Amino acid sequence: MTRFLFYPIFVFSMAIVPALHARETATPDQPGPVAIPYSDVLEVRQAEPTDHAIAYARVLESHGSTDASIPRTLPAVANTGAAGVPAIKPPDREASAAGARVDIDLFEGGKLLLTNGITTIEGGSGGGIATWATIAGREMKGGIGVQGSFTAIELPDFGWRSYGAAIGISDRVELSYVRQDFDTRSAGAALGLGRGYTFNQDVWAAKLRVAGDAVYGSPVLPQIAIGAEYKRNHDGAITALLGASDDEGVDYTLSATKLLLQHSLLVNATVRLTKANQQGLLGFGSAADGYKVQVEGSLAYMLSRRAVVGAEYRSKPDNLGLGEDDWLDIFAAYAVNNHLTLSAAYVDLGSIATFEDQRGGFLQAQIAF
């Protein structure tokens, strides 16, 4: 029955895109040159152009690159009223001199490198273990972007593999899917499951950006997104023996993400409502416990426009009484080119199914357009 809780958010996400597109692409009432119709990001209804410019932060400089598509400065627009700091507007490749319609572009890649995040273990855009408010793909407003990934996690007693794909619509809506395979290896025999027994799970998710922008717009307003993740575990008979009350569940997330360009710093915070045991791989809830509020956080520093390092934290419930621990990671990501991003991390996943000290390596390859 929990899957029906996911459907209204999915339908709402799909229904709101045409309305937002119509609102954002309307021709201004007054003639003359105007900024790109990106009012929800700029926090102004109609910003007048100005000669003032804000330079990219050091990390966004070309470093010898000859890529002419990367602007060196971003025009500023009217003050947002937040401490007198001018907002930054996105590149106006989608706007005409009269602020006419925004055309749909496929896979042209207007976002700054790495600002679409990597792929989380649940398949959406974000960090490795934490969900962000970012939207998958490299497309901005008026575009449709995609990304796909392969993730591997090697631990002392277990192995993780996941394969996922996500689509971003107008940098507003994200739809994603991931298949998770959790190999118990030798631990499977100790648990009575058989050596190499593999838990499998499918995750379908939707995310909607409701306010702000991670890069542009007000420097004090982060990008804010809500999301829902429907998870279906394929090992319900086994997870029921462990005490799980269900083999499916829906996680709900609220995320805020901001890239502080002048400080080369990305900050993210997420609140998650969940009843998943080990992200759902060990089922959902128990006879005594159901939904609980958990938190996730990420802090990243951009070494250059192609490289970023950082750390993440994710709290987790212990519904089954198996000593489920919170998760930590220290990561690095590098954009090899405009479409390929490679990520590596040291992860500390604590205790899993009574096996302590599950620390190891995280590797991911992601393709995005």
Image (cartoon, helix red, strand yellow):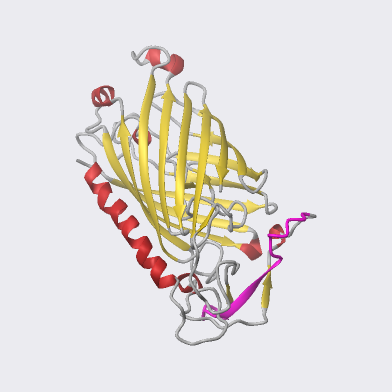
Q: Residue at x 22, y 33 (%)?
A: 245
Q: Residue at x 57, y 82 (%)?
A: 33
Front residue (pair 107, 313):
107
Front residue (pair 280, 234):
234
Q: Is residue 34 above or below residue 339?
A: below
Quarter of the rendering occupied by the N terminus: top left
Q: Residue at x 30, y 25 (%)?
A: 235
Percent position of residue 148, x then y: 51, 40
Percent position of residue 68, x then y: 73, 60
Instruction: Count numbered badges in the picture.
Output: 0
Q: Residue at x 48, y 42 (%)?
A: 120
Residue 131 can be seen in this image: no
Q: Is residue 116 magenta?
A: no
Horizontally, residue 312 falls left or right of residue 72, namely: left
Percent position of residue 353, x then y: 37, 25
Q: Is residue 83 magenta?
A: yes
Secondary structure of the magenta portion, mostly? loop
Q: Which stretch is magenta?
A: 65-85
Horizontally, residue 1 falls left or right of residue 364, namely: left
Front residue (pair 345, 349):
345
Percent position of residue 222, x then y: 49, 64
Residue 136 can be seen in this image: yes
Horizontally, residue 287 falls left or right of residue 233, namely: left
Q: Is residue 286 above or below residue 227?
A: above
